[in-house]
């Protein structure tokens, strides 16, 4: 089977770290061209250090580039309360000698994508604020021709998780999100509508934590941090938002969705709201690039595959 070429843009982040584990366990299906980091859950220094440590820990031998250290127009707001001071909860990963590429991050992404063999395209997988992707398209618009699809974590058709209106990744950099949602490329939106149904239960997290297997134990440590934060209060499920992007690529049968037109509210009052207009099947052919918005997960199957993939990592 031909492997799908992907580029990951992330801000690890506990659930970004799970997404990277899903990537590492899916290398028979996915060819990872590289990873860029973006400030979001933590500062660019912390998320880059985490991406380097995670790639070494998971034997994900791909180039890593350091991306934007703040949103396009706004000051950076991090989520230390949800992901901890390091960004990876209670987990201390082994140190690594691995370094980010010396070249400018955007230029490295551009060159990697433009040097793909003729006819081949990349799928971009952003799991943080969309700052890098917006900059990439603005500075190097030729890249868009070589992008097959964008499968992103962000947004919500219902309520938000930072404000009543907005999901974190879109809220941090709404101007960047607005540019990306207007870029005209096919987008799969894995927003809170689907990710709030996608996670592990407390028993499964505790089982990972008690495992003597180093990878499972490390992920148990990361995810158990969530159990002590406000996001787990009164919830049965520890949501693993960012992993949905990768599992959608490897196991699309786990999810269902609808087509919609999406625009981003950049006003102060409703900052980061993803405003949605569903698109009917009859209208679909008339809309240039509708967004496919996931809204349903087959939870038991999602959990089974996620745990299988985690357990497959040595
Ligand atoms: C998103 O926000 C971040 O805190 C998570 O890593 C995820 O990408 C969920 O709203
Ligand atoms: Ca993230």
Image: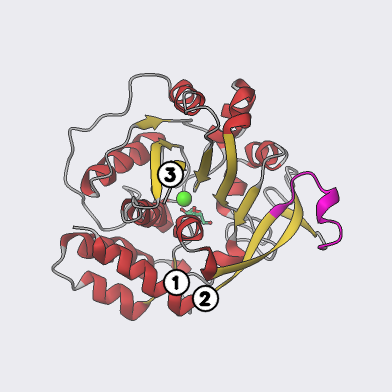
**Main secondary structure along the magenta-highlighted residues:** loop
Magenta extent: 281-291
- The answer to whether residue 196 is left or right of residue 263 is left
Seen from the viewer's position, the closer of residues 126 and 141 is: 141
The span from disc 3 to disc 2 (Cα, nearest Å) is: 26 Å
Task: Look at 58% across and 66% down and name the residue there.
Answer: 194
Residue 299 location (% of width, % of height): 48, 76
Which residue is at the front of the view, 144 or 138? 144
Q: Residue furthest front?
A: 1
Quadrant in the picture for residue 65: top left
Could you tell me which secondary element the residue under label 3 belongs to?
loop
Q: CA distance from mark 3 to mark 1?
A: 23 Å
- Where is residue 178 drawn, in percent x and y? 70, 40
Quick check: can you spot residue 286? yes
Q: Is mark 3 within 8 Å of ligand 2?
A: yes
Residue at 57% x, 28% y is 136
Q: Which residue is mark 2?
A: 298
**Marks 1/2: CA distance?**
6 Å
Residue denoted by label 3: 11
**Comparing labels 3 and 2, the label whose residue is closer to the camera:** 2
From the top left corner, tell me how far across and down residue 172 is, in percent: 57, 44
Under circle 2, the secondary element is loop
Residue beneath disc 1: 302
Find residue 193 and report its image quarter: bottom right
Q: Are marks 1 and 2 in contact (CB under 8 Å)?
A: yes
At label 2, counting other C-alpha atoms closer than 10 Å, the crowd grade (few under 14, some 14-19, many 20 or more) is: some
Q: Quadrant of the C terminus?
A: bottom left
* Label 1 lies in ligand 1 vicinity (Cβ under 8 Å): no
Specify whether residue 232 is painted magenta: no
């Amino acid at each position: 089977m031909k492997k799908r070429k992907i580029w990951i843009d992330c801000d690890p982040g506990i659930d970004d770290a799970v997404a990277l584990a899903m990537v590492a366990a899916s290398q028979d299906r996915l060819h990872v061209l590289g990873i860029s980091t973006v400030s979001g859950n933590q500062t660019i220094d912390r998320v880059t250090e985490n991406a380097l440590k995670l790639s070494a820990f998971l034997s994900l031998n791909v180039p890593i580039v350091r991306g934007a250290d703040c949103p396009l127009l706004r000051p950076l707001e991090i989520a230390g309360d949800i992901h901890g001071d390091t960004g990876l909860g209670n987990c201390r990963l082994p140190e690594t000698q691995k370094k980010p590429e010396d070249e400018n991050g955007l230029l490295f992404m551009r060159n990697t994508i433009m040097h793909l063999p003729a006819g081949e395209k990349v799928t971009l997988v952003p799991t943080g604020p969309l700052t890098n992707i917006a900059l990439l398209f603005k500075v190097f618009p030729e890249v868009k021709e070589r992008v097959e699809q964008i499968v992103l974590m962000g947004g919500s058709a219902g309520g938000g998780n930072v404000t009543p209106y907005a999901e974190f990744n879109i809220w941090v950099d709404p101007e960047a999100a607005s540019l990306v949602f207007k870029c005209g490329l096919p987008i799969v939106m894995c927003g809170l509508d689907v990710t709030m149904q996608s996670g592990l239960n407390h028993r499964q997290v505790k089982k990972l934590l008690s495992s003597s297997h180093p990878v499972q134990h490390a992920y148990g440590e990361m995810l158990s941090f969530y159990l002590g934060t406000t996001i787990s209060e009164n919830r049965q499920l520890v949501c693993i938002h960012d992993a949905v992007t990768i599992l959608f690529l490897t196991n699309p049968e786990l999810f269902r969705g609808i087509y919609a037109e999406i625009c981003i509210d950049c006003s102060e009052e409703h900052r980061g709201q993803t405003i949605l207009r569903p698109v009917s099947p009859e209208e679909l052919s008339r809309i240039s690039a509708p967004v496919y918005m996931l809204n349903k997960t087959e939870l038991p199957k999602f959990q089974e595959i996620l745990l299988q993939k985690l357990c497959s990592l040595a």
